[in-house]
Image (cartoon, rainbow, N blue to C red):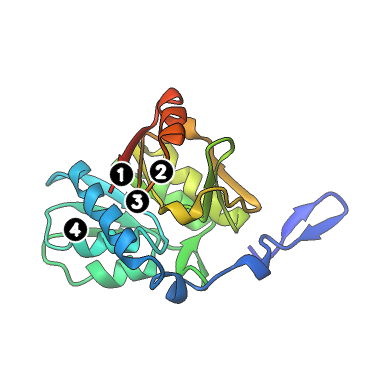
Amino acid sequence: GLLIRTHGGAILPENTSLVRLLSNTLEERKDEKYAICKSAMQFIEPGMNIIIDAGSTTVHLAKLVNGMGVTVITNSVPVLQELMNSETVELLVAGGILRKPSLSFMGAPASFVFDQIHADVLFLGASGFSIEHGLTCTNIIEAETKRHMIRNATKVCLLADSSKLGKMFIANVCGWDSIDCFITDCLSDEHRTALANLGVTTVIA
């Protein structure tokens, strides 16, 4: 996972100058991220199997589901730490290569776990998104892990605040055709209409 093999050589899987530590991003736009996750709770019912992706927004969801009778599948260390002592949440952890900036497990071992399960809802994070080009993140291997989550969930909800609009990174995660619902804090009517035409329901927290 340290290099990506290419014709005639290899490249780094991400631009390290763009990578930001989760410990820093967790404190940014905290109120907006919490409100987004609070809105996401409308899609969770007792008995569900849900995937909580790694990220600075999705980690807030773990605090809200703690105490519910759900099964959570995650590759996020902070989500694991939040739910590991819960008496009501069944926890399944997808292990693999630990990516320290995001405190998330990724790669083939994590993808294998996601391929063994079915989730009612996936709560997906992204480093950036574009109305024209979809979702991206900073790491190619992490993007592949996210695609395995998407394949094994009935409903996919993107949780991302408006500061990520227009930010595009090296690794393509998916297009909007893979997203059922987008929960954010602010989005123009023009962009909401464009997403509705692509079949995406937008929820403003």
Give the farthest residue toward the right: 8
- Report the amino acid beneath label 2: Leu
Residue behind mark 2: 187
Residue 199 quadrant: top left
* Any part of residue 13 in sight: yes
Pointers 4 and 1 in contact (C-beta within 8 Å):
no
* Residue 36 point in image, percent of width and height: 30, 53
Question: Looking at this view, is 171 or 108 the one in front?
Answer: 171
Where disc 1 sits, the SS reads strand
Give the farthest residue toward the bottom: 23
Eyeballing the image, is 126 above or below 30?
A: above
Eyeballing the image, is 194 above or below 146?
A: above
Which mark is first along the chain, 4 or 3? 4
- Report the amino acid beneath label 4: Val
Give the farthest residue toward the front: 189
Q: State which mark lies toward you, 2 or 4.
A: 2
- Report the amino acid beneath label 1: Ile
Residues under labels 2 and 3: Cα distance?
7 Å
Q: Residue at x 37, y 60 (%)?
A: 57
Which mark is first along the chain, 1 or 4? 4
Residue behind mark 4: 65
Q: In the shown orientation, is residue 73 left or right of residue 25?
A: left
Which mark is first along the chain, 1 or 2? 2
Q: Residues within 10 Å of mark 4 (few under 14, many from 20)?
A: many
Q: State which mark lies toward you, 4 or 1.
A: 1
Where disc 3 sits, the SS reads loop
Where disc 2 sits, the SS reads loop
Residues under labels 2 and 1: Cα distance?
7 Å
Pointers 2 and 1 in contact (C-beta within 8 Å):
yes
